[in-house]
Amino acid sequence: MKKQIRIEDIKIRTQLKPGDLGYIMHRHGKMYHEEYNYGIEFETYVGAGLHEFYSQYDQKLDRVWVCEYNELIVGFILLMHRPNNTAQLRYFYLEKEYRGIGLGKKLMDLFIEFMNAVGYDSAYLLTTDELPTAASLYTRHGFKLTKTYSSALFNNEVKEQRYDLILQSR
């Protein structure tokens, strides 16, 4: 009988360790290929973005949340600073077995909490229309769909989407 995974059993850390970025690139490449038939172009896109993140990392403005279960990375999200006091949400993923237990909501809550603590005015994220569960999570946290356009990214014809969040208290 498979053990029921509880959110309380998952450790979330905010410090990167050697191997984390490569693992996130690897898991994105594998998972998005298996679930959406994305090609290697997606994996290299993720790698370039992770390199950009780390090359301009500022611990006061940027943050990662690495989710581990029994020392295995099972989820990830990062906040990357952008111009005009804006944050970008990137590389949000959860392994299949860890979806539906509230971990995605917890990560989004941590993202918004950090945005508020730093004093960001807004945030945005880029995604595709193939992820309706994630889109629902984003909209429940105040993000609004602001753009949709067709693209031939990642070896597929997709509808890219941009979601924006403007914090009202600013």
Image (spheres, helix red, strand yellow):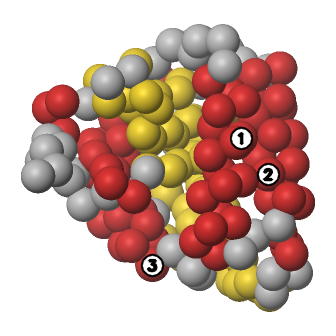
Query: Which is closer to the viewer, label 1 or label 3?
Result: 1
Circles 1, 2 touching at the beta carbon (< 8 Å): yes
Residue highlighted by disc 2: 43
Tag 1 secondary structure: helix
In the depicted view, which residue is nearer to us: 63 or 3? 3
- Is 132 positioned to the left or the right of 11 in the image? right
Residue highlighted by disc 1: 25
- Seen in the picture, residue 44 relative to 143 is either above or below; the reply is above
Label number found at residue 132: 3
Looking at the image, how many numbered discs can be counted on the residues? 3
Residue 39 location, quadrant: bottom right
Type of amino acid at the residue the image marks with label 1 = Met
In the depicted view, which residue is nearer to us: 21 or 91? 21
- Taking the spot 71% from the left edge, 84% from the top edge, the residue there is 159
* Cα separation between marks 3 and 2: 21 Å
- Taking the spot 53% from the left edge, 27% from the top edge, the residue there is 64
Label number found at residue 131: none
Q: Position of residue 150 (x, y in %)?
A: 80, 87
In the depicted view, which residue is nearer to us: 13 or 122? 13
- Is 81 positioned to the left or the right of 111 in the image? right
